[in-house]
Amino acid sequence: MSAALSALDISDAAESWAALGFEIPEGSVWLDGVELRLERPGHGIVGWSLAGIDPVAEIDGLATEVAGSEPGAEASHQNGAIGLDHVVVVTPDFDRTASALAGAGLELRRVREVPNAGIRQGFRRLGPAILELVEARDVPAGPARFWGLVVVVRDLDSLAERLGELLGQIKPAAQPGRRIATLRSSAGLTPAVAFMDPEAQPTSSAKRGSSRTVA
């Protein structure tokens, strides 16, 4: 069984997410089978649950729980959220964190240099979402930490109308043909959160192995 993201533990109050149009049955936000478990001790994203890996308590400082393989729940959200595109982890030492991930069975499938920034990004698919590891110069020395997540919505323009000044400008995303908008800190969430268009369905003539594909 391949490793898959089952849940993220987040410190935010449920009311903060509900105010943005998320449905929260029993204290969790469900996004295409991934559970965002709210009101957890700490600040921001404080841990994750992964299925398909051997038991481990942490991965380079990332609090880790091993989940079962049962399918997650579904929910319909007023804001049109339909899934989790990726979760972002930042590290001051890319090689160290990448090695720790590989040791837990989570080898990065793609690594790229960020032009003119002198940093690296690494990617790996974890079931319904992608892990993005970012080497960041402004991260204090120490272990890796969770930074944020990107939610997929059916209609980004409608969401922008709904959230108004809480949502930043819609811009082209790194993935060709998609757009993204970042939630402003005034929305009251502790992790960095952005919203993105759905991934375009490939046509029969599309080439395999696009820039979005991460095994």
Image: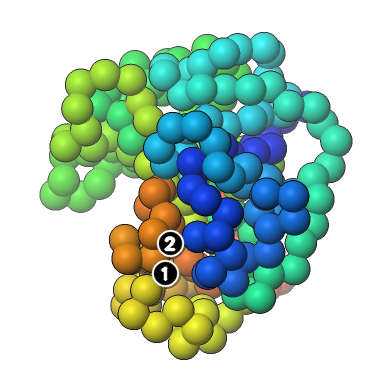
- Judged from the image, the secondary structure of the residue bearing numbered disc 2 is strand
Q: Residue at x 26, y 19 (%)?
A: 142
The mark that comes first in sequence, 2 or 1, is 1
Q: Residue at x 79, y 45 (%)?
A: 72
Q: Quadrant of the C terminus?
A: top right
In this rendering, would 69 be left or right of 31?
Answer: right
Q: Count neighbours of disc 2 (C-alpha within 10 A) and say few if under 14, some if 14 to 19, many if 20 or more.
A: some
Which residue is label 2 attached to? 194
Q: Is residue 186 above or below residue 39?
A: below
**Measured Cα–Cα span from mark 2 to mark 1:** 7 Å
Depth check: give the residue in front, 195 or 211. 195
* Figure quadrant of residue 152: bottom right
- Judged from the image, the secondary structure of the residue bearing numbered disc 1 is strand
Q: Position of residue 30 (x, y in %)?
A: 70, 53
Q: Is residue 159 above or below residue 1?
A: below
Q: Position of residue 36 (x, y in %)?
A: 62, 46
In this rendering, would 35 be left or right of 214?
Answer: right
Pointers 2 and 1 in contact (C-beta within 8 Å): yes
Q: Residue at x 64, y 30 (%)?
A: 49
Q: Residue at x 39, y 59 (%)?
A: 188
Depth check: give the residue in front, 57 or 94. 57
Q: Position of residue 171 (x, y in %)?
A: 34, 75
In this rendering, would 42 be left or right of 115?
Answer: right
Q: Position of residue 69 (x, y in %)?
A: 82, 31
Mark yes or no: residue 132 visible. Answer: no
Depth check: give the residue in front, 116 or 180. 180
Which residue is label 1 attached to? 180
Label drawn at residue 10: none
Report the amino acid beneath label 1: Ile
Q: Quadrant of the N terminus?
A: top right
Q: Is residue 48 above or below residue 38?
A: above
